Image (cartoon, helix red, strand yellow):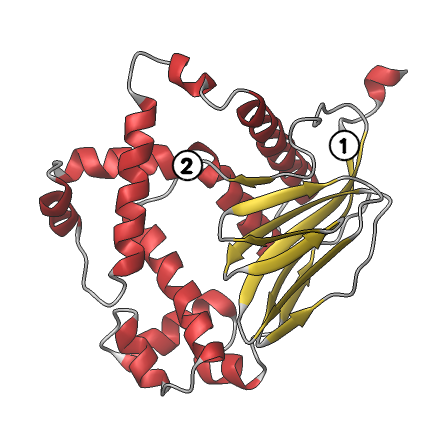
């Protein structure tokens, strides 16, 4: 019966990090491909349309569409998912660049973490996350302002505060930033600021800052000739040994090895379905 058919059938999930050169020849797939950038920028052509995907931007490419992602002399991290679509309505989302809204950042981070560190019931968890994100992106694309009616609280205002804080963190990775510092910058109490950030992103400020620092370190290791000790300082770690330790803990390799191997990492999630 049709009700027994799952909404989607995932065929491939890959998280990839590449170094100085990234050029995939033009190709097509017979499946839907959801492609999302985690850090860096990717030049993309899709059926003779050219654009650049920024961090936290994605595109759902319809089956049969010609595509060719590339970037030269830059480092990038991204993931893609190939799937059969049986029941999801994705007409408004297909073949458009969309930004992952703040209210879906928690699910996006959970998805990336699961691809990199799979656990029990991985397929079911990943499938649920992908379906939720795609449905929400489709709804937001169709009705961008629909979240304004969800609650009497000003959700849009909270998301704007989150985006401002996130932008501030990106600009000031070299600083020792505390909740108190952010509170003084944005004139919001530390506890309320932390609640807004967690509600909008699904993570703490300290975790987001750590994530941004590691991603920036990867870019500097691959795109510059700066000594690793200088890179450590530029992202806010005055203790070189501590930076090396946390980088290895997060990535599985030392900063030096990451640079020597040009940061090329490919994690393909095993799918036994």
Alpha carbon separation for disc pair 1 and 2 = 24 Å
Residue 71 x %, y %: 60, 67
From the viewer's side, name the closer residue of 112 and 122.
112
- For the C terminus, the image quarter is top right
From the viewer's side, name the closer residue of 207 and 94.
94
Image: 2 above or below 156: above
Helix, strand or loop under label 2: helix
Tell me which residue sits at (37%, 85%) in the image: 226
- For the N terminus, the image quarter is top right
- In this image, 124 relative to 29: left or right? left
The label number, if any, that marks residue 64 in the structure image = none
Residue position for label 1: 8
Near mark 2 (Cα within 10 A), the count class, few <14, some 14-19 or many ≥20, is many
Residue position for label 2: 102
Helix, strand or loop under label 1: strand
Residue 43 x %, y %: 61, 60
From the viewer's side, name the closer residue of 234 and 107.
234
Image: 200 above or below 116: above
- In this image, 201 relative to 37: left or right? left
Task: Say whether residue 254 is visible.
Answer: no
Residue 73 x %, y %: 55, 76
Tell me which residue sits at (59%, 45%) in the image: 58
Near mark 1 (Cα within 10 A), the count class, few <14, some 14-19 or many ≥20, is some
Residue 269 x %, y %: 70, 54
Tell me which residue sits at (18%, 33%) in the image: 192
Residue lying farthest right? 1
Picture quadrant of residue 202: top left
Picture quadrant of residue 265: bottom right
């Amino acid at each position: 019966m049709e009700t027994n058919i799952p909404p989607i059938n995932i065929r491939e999930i890959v998280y990839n990090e590449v170094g100085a050169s990234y050029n995939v020849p033009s190709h097509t797939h017979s499946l839907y491909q959801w492609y999302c950038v985690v850090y860096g920028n990717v030049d993309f052509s899709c059926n003779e349309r050219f654009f650049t995907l920024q961090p936290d931007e994605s595109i759902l490419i319809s089956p049969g569409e010609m595509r060719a992602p590339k970037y030269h002399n830059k480092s990038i991290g991204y993931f893609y998912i190939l799937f059969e679509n049986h029941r999801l309505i994705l007409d408004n989302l297909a073949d458009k660049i969309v930004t992952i809204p703040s209210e879906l950042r928690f699910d996006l981070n959970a998805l990336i973490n699961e691809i990199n560190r799979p656990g029990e019931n991985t397929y079911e968890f990943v499938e649920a996350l992908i379906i939720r994100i795609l449905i929400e992106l489709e709804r937001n694309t169709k009705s961008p302002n629909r979240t304004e009616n969800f609650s009497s609280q000003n959700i849009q205002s909270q998301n704007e505060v989150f985006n401002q804080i996130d932008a501030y963190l990106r600009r000031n990775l070299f600083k020792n930033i505390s909740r108190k510092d952010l509170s003084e910058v944005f004139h919001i109490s530390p506890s309320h600021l932390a609640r807004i950030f967690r509600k909008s992103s699904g993570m703490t400020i300290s975790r987001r800052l750590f994530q941004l620092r590691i991603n920036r370190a990867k870019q500097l290791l691959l795109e510059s000739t700066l000594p690793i000790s200088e890179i450590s300082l530029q992202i806010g770690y005055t203790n070189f040994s501590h930076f090396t330790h946390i980088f290895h803990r997060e990535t599985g390799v030392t900063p030096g090895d990451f640079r020597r191997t040009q940061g090329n990492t490919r994690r393909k999630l095993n799918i036994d379905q």
